[in-house]
Image (tube, rainbow, N blue to C red):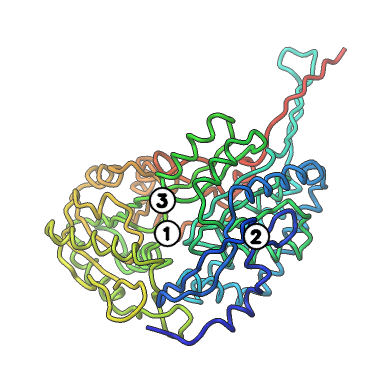
Amino acid sequence: MTGPDLTPDLAALLPDEHRRLLVGGRWRDAEDGATFTVHDPADGSVLTRVADASVGDAVEALDAAVAAQPAWAATPPRERGEILRRAFEMIADRADDLAMLMSLEMGKTVKEAKGEVGYGNEFFRWYSEEAVRIHGRWMQAPAGGSRLLTIKKPVGPCFFVTPWNFPLAMGTRKIGPAVAAGCTMVIKPAAQTPLTMLALAAILGEAGLPDGVLNVLPSTHAKEMSQALQGDDRLRKVSFTGSTGVGRTLVRQSADQLQRVSMELGGNAPFLVFADADLDAAVDGAMVAKMRNMGEACTAANRFLVHQDVAAEFAEKLAARMGGLTLGRGQDDGVDVGPLIDEDAVDSVARLVTDAVHDGARVVTGGGRPDGAGWFYQPTVLLDVPAESAINTEEIFGPVAPITTFATEDEAVAAANATEYGLASYVYTRDLSRTIRMAEALDFGMVGVNTGLISNPAAPFGGVKASGFGREGGFEGIEEYLETTYVALPVT
């Protein structure tokens, strides 16, 4: 699964200048000149090296954000919105290049990467329109004699940490509302996939974002960086997308400075298929919910809970679709499934499948690693998976669909809720009353009914329990970046 020399393509997609730090509007090397490697997951080769920010660089970036905050907060909302709108148009024009860059560093197919560019870009369009709709309220006090006025103000300098699985969308989902609200930012993209974020930052600069509003720090020193920034009382908000373990650490670190936090953490999404479901539609939805991003998504269907009367038929239909997918380098024509992000990811998926089979599960299709270079795993369907198997309790983050059966609706709900996580869930049924019961009974921040795709920039994305708190997207998303000031106005 090796490919051609990609260096010329990469150089055209992201100039050397933009493989550095962006601090205060200036692209520069790390203070100690350090760099780190970015790998191509399709064959493990080195794509390039980028600047490796230190704690000192992070403090300088926060200095820049703090310095830019007053003027940026005072910038008219329409102007902030127009910057996002111009960036939206530039991203749309460069979608092919951004998709290729993302495919190179992350592994997903160019087609899927282009879908992410379109989805992620919609956050800029949405929040370009929301910037001018920030408002407070005016009312008479219930007892009379005074008026109550509330006004909205930007939270202030923010620290963002984004994951490797959606290199563009997880950035735009945070940057969009922050820009609209008038907040400045320091952002640390994942070390596995920093290139797309660096390209995005360059576009925002072209769109007119003032120096210091967005500072980008690719780095292998995430722990030290977060400790330093969260220990600084000038930082007012942290937004993180990633694992629950790291999220808990960041929440603890936020306590001393009482920083606002938004946490979009791990998931263990159930995919419920009832006996009355349209099985063909359910399989279509399963392919989306499971195979988006090779299964490397926090919203990915992790546990397939299927009524015992239709489980065998559902498994057969799903296996036919999964088994027909073509693995390969994401930039090649005809490829459906790219590599996982690294060797550790492949090892983790392989362990979960091996343990499930040991527990009594049956492999319907897939179940192993293909021959050749790269970090690939076969699309896999498992049937008769015991409820207590590790693959039903851990986040798989790979192209594996474990099927466990249920007999009653109550049993299905209990099994779906038997997890510390509460991000996404999916339900397939043609019974309207059951639909309502499921929406009310499932302990998840999002419920997809007869659909495998729930993410939408106009909707509030987020979870409950160990999946975090706060919402990104929708009308709700901008509130995460605003504080409320109440003004009492006596009337005599």
Which of the two residues, 95 or 21, is positioned nearer the viewer here?
21
From the viewer's perspective, tell me whether residue 203 is left or right of residue 377. right
Q: CA distance from mark 2 to mark 1?
A: 27 Å
From the viewer's perspective, tell me whether residue 441 is left or right of residue 187. left
Residue 228 against residue 168 in the figure, above or below = above
Q: Amino acid at mark 3?
A: Ala
Residue 5 against residue 115 in the figure, above or below = below
The disc label shown at residue 424, or none:
3
Residue 244 against residue 107 in the figure, above or below = above
The disc label shown at residue 297, or none:
1
Q: Is residue 329 visible?
A: yes
The disc label shown at residue 133, or none:
none
Question: Residue 402 placed where, x, y %?
Answer: 24, 60
Q: CA distance from mark 3 to mark 1?
A: 11 Å
Element type where label 1 sits in the image: loop
Element type where label 2 sits in the image: strand
Which quadrant of the structure image shows residue 289? bottom left
Q: Amino acid at mark 1?
A: Ala
Question: Residue 60 placed where, x, y %?
Answer: 68, 48
How many other residues sit within 10 Å of disc 3, few (<14), some (14-19) or many (≥20)? many
Question: Residue 293 placed where, x, y %?
Answer: 43, 66
Judging by the rendered image, the residue that carries numbered circle 2 is: 21
